[in-house]
Image (spheres, rainbow, N blue to C red):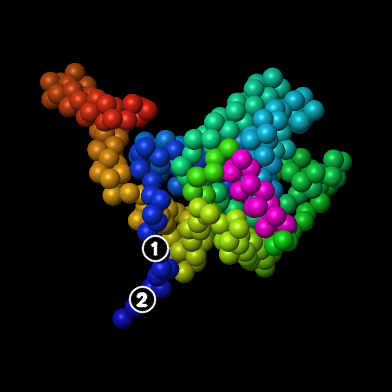
Amino acid sequence: MKLQTIVPLRSSKERIDHHSTLFLVGSCFVENIGRKFNYYQFQTLQNPLGILFQPEAIENFIARSVEERMYETADVFNFNERWHCFDAHSDLSDPSKEQLLTNLNSALHDTRNQLENATHVIITLGTAWVYRNIETQKRVANCHKVPQKNFTKELLSKEEIEESLKQIIANIRKVNENASVIFTISPVRHLKDGFVENQRSKANLISAVGKIMEATSTNKNLHYFPAFEIMLDELRDYRFYAEDMVHPNNLAIDYIWEKFKNVWVSEKAESVMKAVEEIQRGLSHRPFNEESEQHQLFLKSLNDKISVLNKEFPFMKFKP
């Protein structure tokens, strides 16, 4: 008796190990998977401008990074005693205009460097709903709680999303012809847009990615990982959701991570991950007596394990 539908998956030939270089950008799935990669000490750069929910925001960010178009004073604004940029998440906002510009331009610089060296680029699309600034007539990545009357709300068409994805791929290929580009659709429902509106949004995203994957002229090293479908078809019970009944909970995240790992992470990397996890658990251990001989021996053993890993992977940085 089958009590669950299973989304069929096929292992990739272009798998990830600890010598891989990863760039992750987009919506919440990137944040969740990125935390896993960071925990296991992979070489990653994740959302340097913060979470970006819609494809045009990702397109603009990657284009600016590749073209090295730095941010200037005209690109930022002051609101509620903080400086913001409509291209970035509020996490980057700062009381200092100079510091915000420094952080924005550092993000562009780091992103171009990572893209040039990336073996894998993971892009998660969250929504097709966008907000247009009435004053500038430009679509924004984040409204920063500026009053709603300053924006109009629009739904990107399948054709607009498809064109945006083509531009994202083209800009990545300008600096890196060989990286595997992995698209996903975020399983998080944007119910503030409305139940029907959320479904329309996801449908446009899925249709546009499907068109890109079908286009033989552009789909070299392009892949789709069905995070959205796994959440909806394999984890269709509310026990897999957080208290807000919108976001996947830790159990669901772990489940989808295991699926992603089975497709994309190499067997060689898994043995390294086990060694990393042993160290991470050791670092989180809190002894009853820090001065005891037993604890000092434990710390020495832990440091020896870190030294062994650092000989092969000097980029790994462990923090207690």
Which of label 2 and label 1 is nearer to you?
A: 1
What is the secondary structure assignment of the residue under circle 2?
A: loop
Tag 1: amino acid: Arg
Per the image, the residue denoted by label 2 is: 3
Q: In this view, does 5 lie to the left or right of 196?
A: left
State whether residue 198 is above or below residue 266: below
Q: Quadrant of the N terminus?
A: bottom left
Magenta segment: 160-174
State the residue at coordinates (70%, 38%). 87
Residue 45's tag is: none
State the residue at coordinates (23%, 28%). 308
Tag 2: amino acid: Leu
State whether residue 220 is above or below residue 63: below
What is the secondary structure assignment of the residue under circle 1?
A: loop
Residue 10's tag is: 1
C-alpha gap between disc 2 and disc 1: 22 Å
Residue 320 visible in the snapshot: no
State the residue at coordinates (20%, 25%). 304
Q: In this view, does 141 lie to the left or right of 9?
A: right
31 within the magenta span: no
State whether residue 61 is above or below residue 308: below
Q: Main secondary structure of the magenta part?
A: helix
For marks 2 and 1 on the same chain, the one whose residue lies earlier in the sequence: 2
State the residue at coordinates (45%, 64%). 230
